[in-house]
């Protein structure tokens, strides 16, 4: 979407350097995946591997990157945080030397990369801090961009206003069309809400297993610039991990500074999910449960939600998300405001 909005989507495809760090409903193994967790990767530099369409995660790991590579024209390269911020810095330096890129954009959806680290709503600071720390150590300009302030449900948009510049652009429905088919299956809630707001959806969306309420407002589809050095100076965790050489070392800093590590949370949740029995999707019973969930959501002022949130709220295994989605779209298609689910205005028969 950003490539289409900033660069017209034409010319040379972008190289997207990103983590293979999916939700547990896609990848049941906690934490990020490295090159050793895949077959079929292609070397781009000494430390950087690309993820082509034919690449496959090695079970039990999972990843959305090969399918993204199959459906989008861009090159997907793997951020490997095994060697901490020092390792990611090395990967960036190798890519810059190899590609000589015209521009480098560091994009965060939601804006939690601008956190201090002590915010009570912050939930996933480590991945952002690692990337921020690395980008601040390369000797070329890196532009920090925040899309959809507040849409990740971590730092409220109003708390970010004095940490960002004015909006550089606003995503439109036309920009969303470049990834429209991907959003039909990809589980990213923040990007899903970003796309929905670009398509004009407004309201209050409930997300994640915790049921966080996220406003869908005019600010949702905007993209803002932010000062990279200011972000580093503000982010205590990013500063602490600048010289880290292992992911474990960076994770320990997160525990000390933020009070937790998101990988620990994933470890605990994965252990709990692994103890749950395999479930069958009962259509009639599921729709009755959905009615109750929607009634409760209406009482909280919620207008929209995600299929991930419904899956977890109904107590279903994440593997059933796509089956649940198919059931809901076939039984109540008028409630689908792509890629979100609109809460019904009143009782609906099962």
Image (spheres, helix red, strand yellow):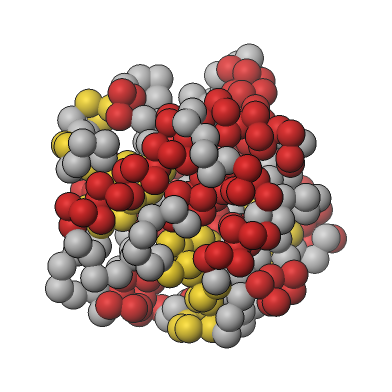
In percent of width and height, residue 159 lies at 74, 69
Judge by depth and name the residue closer to the eye, 28 or 311.
28
**As displayed, is residue 34 above or below residue 16?**
above
In percent of width and height, residue 245 lies at 47, 31
What residue is drawn where x is 26% and y is 79%?
Answer: 8
In the picture, measured across the screen, residue 162 lies left or right of residue 93, that is right
What residue is drawn where x is 61% and y is 75%?
Answer: 164
In percent of width and height, residue 109 lies at 53, 62
How many marks on residues? 0
Q: Quadrant of the N terminus?
A: bottom left
In the picture, measured across the screen, residue 229 lies left or right of residue 136, that is right
Judge by depth and name the residue closer to the eye, 302 or 324.
302
Q: Residue furthest right?
A: 299
In the picture, measured across the screen, residue 211 lies left or right of residue 249, that is right
**As displayed, is residue 1 above or below residue 168?**
above
Judge by depth and name the residue closer to the eye, 168 or 95.
95
In percent of width and height, residue 327 lies at 50, 46
Judge by depth and name the residue closer to the eye, 67 or 295.
67
- Residue 287 visible in rendering: no
- Residue 48 visible in rendering: yes
Find residue 123 and report its image quarter.
top right
What residue is drawn where x is 17% and y is 43%?
Answer: 44
């Amino acid at each position: 979407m950003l490539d289409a909005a900033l660069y017209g989507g034409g010319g040379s495809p972008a190289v997207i350097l990103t983590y293979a760090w999916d939700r547990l409903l896609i990848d049941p193994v906690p934490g990020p995946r490295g090159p050793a967790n895949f077959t079929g990767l292609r070397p781009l530099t000494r430390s950087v591997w690309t993820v082509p369409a034919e690449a496959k995660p090695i079970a039990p790991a999972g990843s959305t990157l090969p399918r993204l590579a199959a459906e989008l024209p861009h090159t997907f390269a793997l951020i490997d945080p095994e060697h901490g911020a020092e390792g990611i810095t090395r990967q960036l330096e190798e890519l810059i030397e190899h590609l000589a890129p015209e521009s480098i954009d560091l994009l965060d959806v939601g804006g939690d990369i601008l956190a201090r680290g002590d915010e009570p709503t912050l939930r996933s600071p480590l991945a952002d801090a690692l990337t921020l720390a690395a980008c601040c150590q390369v000797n070329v300009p890196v532009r920090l961009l925040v899309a959809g302030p507040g849409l990740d449900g971590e730092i409220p948009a109003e708390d970010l206003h004095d940490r960002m510049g004015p909006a550089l652009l606003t995503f439109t429905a036309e920009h969303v069309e470049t990834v429209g088919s991907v959003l039909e299956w990809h589980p990213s809630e923040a990007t899903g809400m970003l796309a929905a707001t670009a398509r004009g959806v407004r309201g209050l969306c409930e997300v994640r297993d915790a049921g966080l309420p996220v406003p869908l407002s005019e600010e949702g589809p905007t993209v803002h610039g932010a000062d990279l050095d200011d972000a580093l100076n503000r982010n205590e965790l990013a500063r602490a991990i600048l010289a880290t050489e292992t992911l474990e070392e960076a994770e320990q800093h997160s525990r000390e500074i933020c009070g937790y590590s998101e990988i620990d949370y994933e470890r605990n949740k994965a252990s709990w999910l692994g103890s749950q029995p395999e479930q069958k999707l009962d259509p009639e019973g599921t729709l009755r449960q959905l009615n109750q969930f929607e009634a409760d959501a209406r009482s909280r002022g919620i207008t929209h939600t995600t299929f991930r949130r419904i899956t977890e709220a109904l107590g279903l295994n994440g593997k059933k998300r796509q089956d649940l989605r198919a059931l809901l779209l076939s039984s109540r298609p008028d409630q689908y405001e792509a890629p979100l689910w609109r809460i019904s205005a009143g009782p609906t028969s099962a």
